[in-house]
């Protein structure tokens, strides 16, 4: 049931999500594989993460599979190489959406995907899908534990707030009116 993960697009995903801190990371002790798996498993409910593939990015962006999975979900731990990405776990459609985003390509049409980030999310721009640091125009926000619905038709998002500075305690649309708009739904 597990499909092989294309290494190059997944490496792009991790590379762009790693915003900064390579020099700081050099001072950190590299966690064991067991610790990385534990971190990745915190991204999703236990009944999802226990059978998910677990992958980790190296400092150079190369991917290493820590554990093969059987349920079509891929989970990633906190990056041992740099700050972020936070633990995340996604189904195959969300992984394809994320790979398209990372490659600056249109996301797959008609492929609704689910992504868990039960540990919350590193600060990110709410308006610019490709921002790597805060500035006066890109509305940097922090999000607590949430799930994301990606790949829905634009009308799906019509009834949710799309403002640049959302209330992150309620569902809202991130990256509104871009090909990468998606629903952020807090769960705590």
Image (cartoon, rainbow, N blue to C red):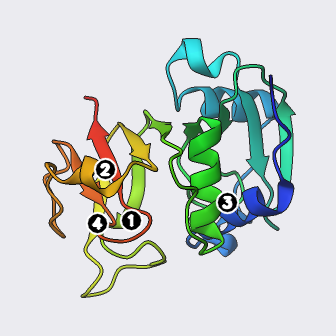
Where is residue 151 shown, x and y percent of the image? 46, 50
Residue displayed at 71% across by 35% down? 36
- Residue that numbered label 1 is attached to: 124
Vertically, is 39 above or below 162? Answer: above
> Tag 1 or tag 4, which sits nearer the N-term?
1
Q: Which mark is residue 143?
A: 2
Give the crowd class for mark 4: few <14, some 14-19, many >=20 residues within 10 Å: many
Identify residue for label 3.
14
The answer for how far apart the CA atoms under marks 3 and 4 are is 22 Å
Residue at mark 1 to residue at mark 3: CA–CA distance: 14 Å
- Is there CB contact under 8 Å for labels 4 and 2? no
Which-is-in-front pick, marks 4 and 2?
4
**Relative to 167, is 15 above or below?**
below
Question: Where is the N terminus found, in terms of image quarters?
Answer: top right
Q: Secondary structure at mark 1?
A: strand
Q: CA distance from mark 2 to mark 1?
A: 8 Å
Q: Badge 1, how many Cα within 10 Å: few under 14, some, many 20+?
A: many
Q: Are marks 4 and 1 in contact (CB under 8 Å)?
A: no
Q: Residue at x 68, y 67 (%)?
A: 15
Task: Compare marks 2 and 1 and give the one earlier in the sequence.
Answer: 1
Q: Nearer the viewer, residue 101 or 30?
A: 101
Q: Which mark is residue 176?
A: 4
Mark nearer the N terminus (3 vs 4): 3
Give the residue displayed 57% in from the left and 11% down from the top. 47
SS label for mark 4: loop
First reached walking from the N terminus: tag 4 or tag 2 = 2
Near-viewer residue (79 or 159): 159
């Amino acid at each position: 049931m597990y499909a092989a993960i294309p290494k190059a697009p997944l490496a792009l995903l991790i590379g762009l999500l790693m915003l900064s801190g390579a020099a700081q990371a050099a001072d950190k002790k590299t966690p064991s594989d067991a610790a990385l798996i534990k971190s990745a498993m915190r991204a999703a409910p236990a009944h999802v993460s226990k059978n998910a593939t677990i992958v980790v990015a190296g400092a150079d962006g190369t991917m290493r599979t820590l554990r093969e999975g059987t349920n079509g979900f891929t989970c990633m731990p906190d990056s041992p190489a740099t700050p972020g990405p936070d633990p995340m776990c996604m189904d195959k459609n969300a992984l394809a959406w994320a790979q398209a985003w990372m490659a600056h390509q249109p996301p797959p049409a008609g492929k609704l995907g689910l992504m868990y980030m039960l540990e919350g999310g590193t600060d990110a721009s709410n308006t610019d899908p490709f921002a790597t640091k805060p500035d006066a125009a890109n509305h940097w926000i922090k999000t607590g534990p949430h799930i994301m619905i990606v790949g829905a038709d634009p009308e799906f998002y019509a009834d949710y707030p799309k403002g640049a500075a959302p209330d992150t305690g309620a569902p809202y649309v991130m990256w509104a009116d871009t090909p990468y708009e998606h629903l952020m739904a807090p769960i705590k």
